[in-house]
Image: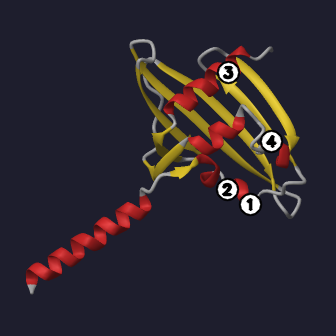
Amino acid sequence: MKKLRIVFIALLVFGILAVYFRPRPLRDILKVAEINPDGTAYCTLFDITQGRTRNWSDSAAVFFDSSDELFWPFMNEVTVAGPVFYKASSVNSDLVNLYFALPQHDGTYRQATVELILSSEDNFEKYMAFINIGNRGYIVTSGKDVIHSFIEEVRELPA
């Protein structure tokens, strides 16, 4: 009977951890489905590594639409697990911060800060990706190449 109780508790703990750490797309973490599609969404990107800033604004419906070649893959193909510990930047990292103002149905804006951290070895042959959203850290489970491509595309945009 004691072994059965231990097995039950272990399965329960494993089940809770599996649900908690299930991979979710970035758009679910940012609650994009809850924004007002008729409002204007704003995004400021600050590339800390290169000291550049970019600004975007558009209708939220257009901003997060599947036709958007910059943000759509980033929001939908990057999956994260967590939240876990908040990750500070590390040596040999590409650091990019995104500051979003997302329109809500009541006319207000919800702000979200997304910190992208790519730690590289051997010129991005091997790299680790980590994302902080607000004060919570998330482990990137898939889409590291999408984050790398996103950062590279943003860097190629005219100032």
Q: Earlier in the sequence, mark 2 or mark 4?
A: 2
Residue depth check, mark 2 versus mark 3: number of the one nearer the observer: 3
Q: What label does residue 31 carry, if any? A: 2
Q: What residue type is labelled 1?
A: Glu
Whole-Å distance between the Cαs marked 2 and 1?
6 Å
Q: Are marks 2 and 1 in contact (CB under 8 Å)?
A: yes
* Displayed quadrant of residue 55: top right
Give coordinates of residue 116: x percent, y percent: 56, 32
Left or right: residue 96 versus residue 154 is left
Compared to 25, does 125 lie above or below? above
Residue designated by label 1:
34
Q: Are marks 2 and 4 in contact (CB under 8 Å)?
A: no
Left or right: residue 30 versus residue 89 is right
Give coordinates of residue 157: x percent, y percent: 76, 17
Residue designated by label 4:
63
Q: Which amino acid does label 2 sit on?
A: Lys
Residue depth check, mark 1 versus mark 3: number of the one nearer the observer: 3
Query: Helix, strand, or loop for circle 3?
Result: helix
